[in-house]
Amino acid sequence: MFADREFIMRSQGQVRFIRVSSRAQKMAAGAAVGVLGMWAASVGALALSQVSTGSESAALAKRAANVAKAEQNVAQYRENVDTVAADLARRQKFIEQVVDAHIQELPEQSGEAQPTAQTDATVKKVSAAIPGAGALAQIEAEQLALVDRLTRYADQRSDAAMASIRKLGLNPNAMISRARMAEGGPLVKLATGADGSVDPRFVKMGRSLSRMDALENGLASIPQVSPAHVAYVSSSYGYRSDPFTGGAAFHAGLDFPGPMGSPIYAAAQGRVTFVGQKSGYGNCIEVTHGNGLMTRYGHLSGFRTRVGQEVEAGALIGAMGSTGRSTGPHLHFEVRVNDRPVNPRPFLEAARNQGASIQGNNGAQRENH
């Protein structure tokens, strides 16, 4: 690239020879590269300076925006103290109505929620800028903390109810869906804003409480109370030898033997939908509990309820007897899901703390359809 070179130049009839050595070419090339390097460095430094300036400007703009937002919050309190106070009053009414409807009284040890760092900072800013509005800002922070506490408390109770329902082999999500399918009533609007809107945090709390109610009502409607206070079951659910024919037969419930006239109790809360006689069952009561659940009480000697009556779990509804297809005084108890019989034993054993005692059919003395 840098071999010795000669150039012939002719000017005004004269010829000249110009020789450029290899060393001279290398020196010229080095100088050119140096000049280009200096130019590139200058351009790069200028570009970096512009980028740095742009980043600093963006950071300054962001800080300015945050300051502006904080100032806006303070300005909102300064200019609209009356409006803020009215909104807080609406929020407080919303909270009180929801608590009264779903919980009545919030346990003290349900997970205390503290105001967040953001709300705490807002309280300080508002208090510093507008001493008279600091109390309102503190109330708002406490309200939001209470909403968070209520939401978490409802979710905890929902989780517990779902676990209990699943242990009984039932689908808790289906109970929630059925509860939402059967809703209605007069419109009583709740709002947290003057325009009728509801703060999203309050919406979340309301949904959690509604879900808790649906699950706990569903759980309360599941038969879990022993329908008779007896020591044992004389005949279990499933296939057995029929007490009249001796042949194989299916027994759709449990038999509770006891003295004539012994009290019979509703196994769960519900509505009485049948009081009368049924073939094979004799005097019979049916209680519908919702979610497709129904309990049947057969062979009674007397009724202590009427059709359409709402009963609580453990309510007295009848008296033990031996009517219908029966060999002696006892209660025939069935649990039906969508009118199909299921084994009542798992439901009753799930509530041993309520006095249910199902011990199998050892020492059986009487049998029934």
Image: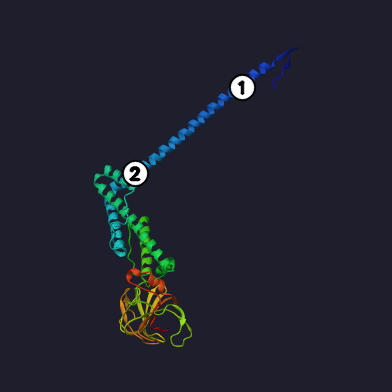
Residue type at the position of mark 2:
Ala
Residue at image x 33%, y 59%?
191
Local SS, label 1: helix
Asked which quadrant contains residue 70, the reply is top left
Q: Is residue 12 visible?
A: no
**Taking 82 as reference, is 341 left or right?**
right
Please tell me how crowded label 1 is: few (under 14), some (14-19), or many (20+) other residues with Cα within 10 Å. Answer: few
Q: How many marks?
A: 2
Which quadrant is home to the C terminus? bottom left
Q: In this view, does 144 lie above or below 314?
A: above
The residue tagged 2 is: 70
Q: Earlier in the sequence, mark 1 or mark 2?
A: 1
Pointers 1 and 2 in contact (C-beta within 8 Å): no
Q: How crowded is mark 2: few (under 14 residues within 10 Å), some or many (20 or more)?
A: some
Instruction: Pick whichever, 112 or 169, lies toward us.
Output: 169
Of the residues shown, which amino acid type is indicated by label 1? Ala
- The answer to which quarter of the image holds residue 164 is bottom left
43 relative to 240, above or below: above
- The picture places residue 158, in percent across and down from the top left corner, at 38, 62
In which quadrant is the N terminus drawn?
top right
Kindly report the distance in space between the C-alpha atoms of the residues bearing marks 1 and 2: 57 Å
The disc label shown at residue 32, or none: 1
Residue farthest toward the front in the current orientation of the protein? 363
Locate residue 244, reporting x and y percent: 44, 88
At horizontal 59% and vertical 25% (from top left) the residue drawn is 36
Residue in view at x 56 percent, y 25 percent:
39
Where is 95 relative to 263, above or below?
Answer: above
